[in-house]
Image (tube, rainbow, N blue to C red):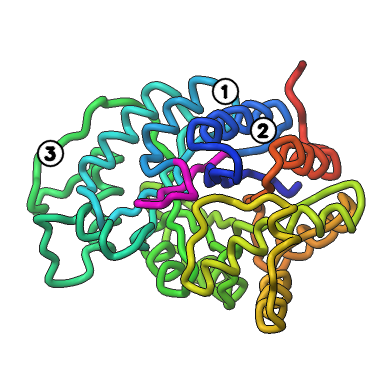
Amino acid sequence: MLKLGILDQSNITEGSGPREALQATTALAVEADRLGYSRFWVSEHHSSKALAHSSPEVLIAHLAANTSRIRVGSGGIMLPHYSAYKVAENFRLLEALYSNRIDLGVGRAPGGRPLSTRALQEGHYHSADPYPQQIIDLIAYLNDAVPADHRFAGLSVSPSVDTVPELWLLGSSGGTARLAAQTGASYAFAQFFGTQGGAEATSFYRDNFEPSLMSPSPHSLAAITVICADTQEEAERLATSSDLFFLALYKGMELPYLPSVQSALDYPYTPYDRQQIEATRSYRVVGTPDAVKTRLLELAEEYGSEELLIVSSIHDFEARLKSYRLVAEAFELERSAD
């Protein structure tokens, strides 16, 4: 049975602010828990006017406290900005508070522009790519398995608990798939970025996976943009908000909010703009519940993954909730008792 989770970026929508965006994220997590979604991840972005959060670990604590059974995690922590040891401490604490419900998704992307990266890494000087070693260190720290010849031999991570967060390496390239396979971590492919080669990357990951302290067997998922409504026409109308938002990003013009459908419909698109939107739509799933289910099952088979994460950037919150409800109903997810 295909499992479905949610990746939420706390979009600040046109006409509202960051507080409302965070309240919407919390309400969505509560509803996702009730509907039977498997996990709920929040992302890390810096110096962004359009996205409401930059500290997943803080938001995870809040969301886990407001839910009861769904796994909550980061999608993800941008590890090169930080100490692997401190990240291990943060997530061991979360794991102690919410046993068997915490996911630690990590990535190597900056999550922002060069200026915010410089601010985050002020005083850090790397002569080489630190990320592969950080992953190795993180696994050792999370499992109290720092080797005797390690540069920090004898180091422990508190609190000491008997469970470990799930570790997921997030990426949109074969390089991350290779690293996830070599270190025995789980692998999440960011298909919603529009990057090609996801099926090949996940196949390479599965074929080359090496069991580790984190997992004896490979686990992979793909994050997919999904917009679902009662009719194809309504789904396509709702999708215009994210069409315009990502078109602006593609053209180097970050909007300060996720635009309303009306703003998107009124925008003076050029023929080139429309070609770009059409190309973007090719890797999104937009349609009725039956159409969405069919396409998601195809993508899961293509990726060889037992789970998908859904990303739904819809301006109207009630329409966003309905989209997730329709998908849950189409897949007959196991709801909690109301």
Q: Position of residue 29 (x, y in %)?
A: 60, 31
Q: Position of residue 154 (x, y in %)?
A: 9, 39
Examine the rendering and report whether any part of residue 312 can be seen.
no
Q: Is residue 294 above or below residue 83?
A: below
User: Is disc 1 placed on a helix, strand or loop?
Assistant: loop
State the image quarter where residue 27 is shown.
top right
State the image quarter where residue 321 is shown.
top right
Verify whether residue 47 appears in magenta. Answer: yes
Q: Is residue 35 above or below residue 303?
A: above
Q: Which residue is mark 3?
A: 155
Q: Residue visible at 24% across and 38% down?
A: 144
Q: Which residue is mark 2?
A: 32
Examine the rendering and report whether any part of residue 87 can be seen.
yes
Q: Position of residue 138 (x, y in %)?
A: 27, 48
Q: Amino acid at mark 2?
A: Ala
Specify whether 66 is left or right of 84: right
Tag 2 and tag 1, C-beta contact below 8 Å: yes
- Start-end of magenta stretch: 40-52
Which one is nearer the viewer's eye here, 50 or 330?
A: 50
Q: Position of residue 28 (x, y in %)?
A: 63, 33
